[in-house]
Amino acid sequence: FPSHDKGLFLMVNFSNAQWVEWAQGVYDGGRSNSIGKPSVDLDGNQIYIGSLRACMGCDLQMYVKKYSKSNVLRWSIGWGSGTTNEEVYPQVATTDAAGNVIIAGYFTSSTFTVDSSTILSSPLLSTNFLLKLNPAGAVKWAVIIETLPVYMACDETGKIYMTGKGHT
């Protein structure tokens, strides 16, 4: 990995003895990308979220990666083709007892195309969203929310708890 570049993002798994068990880097060539707060489900699967700009001048595309507890990539999905004028910033992820993945974040474009049947739209300069994926990564639902998410958790029934900042 490059040693002192702003374009390096790391996903790291530490053991109980505080040793690095696994690490993976994403190098973006110095483009303005972001990485959100990860999560781990009840089976030990790791969920990583972030945004990646495929090229200079391209849109910021959101991604979600799920790794097994043995650090094998189970699936990786992304949104945006790079030319949709969508800018999406996932902030935090959590999982529920059923293994569903819940992601909260915001988008700064007028729309966020979640899938072919779910398009979130807003006239605001920045709009917050909540997105739920099934354990295999397929979209279950997506909604616009008032809170800019900071932290999030689920209880055993699937109820979502979130802290964040509201719009004024």
Image (tube, rainbow, N blue to C red):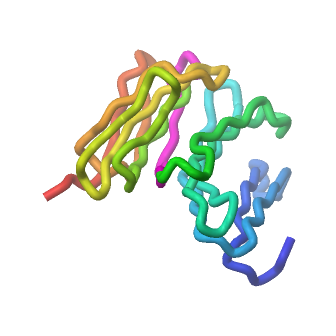
Residue at (63%, 25%) from the top-left corner? 137
Residue 34 image point, x, y percent: 57, 61
Report how many numbered discs are placed on residues in the image: 0
Residue at (52%, 47%) from the top-left corner? 84
Query: Where the C terminus falls, by quadrant?
Result: bottom left
Q: Residue furthest front?
A: 83
Q: Nearer the viewer, residue 168 or 53?
A: 53
Residue at (84%, 76%) from the top-left corner? 2
Residue 157 image point, x, y percent: 41, 16
- Classify 4 as above or below 143: below
Residue 3 image point, x, y percent: 82, 80
Residue 121 location, quadrant: top left
Residue 8 location, quadrant: bottom right
Magenta region includes residue 27: no
Residue 30 shows in this picture: yes
Residue 165 image point, x, y percent: 26, 55
Q: Is residue 23 left or right of residue 111?
A: right
Magenta region includes residue 87: yes
Per the rendered image, the range of residues in magenta is 86-99
Query: Where the N terminus falls, by quadrant?
Result: bottom right
Q: Nearer the viewer, residue 130 or 37?
A: 130
- Classify 5 as above or below 58: below
- Classify 61 as above or below 46: below
Residue at (70%, 31%) from the top-left corner? 44
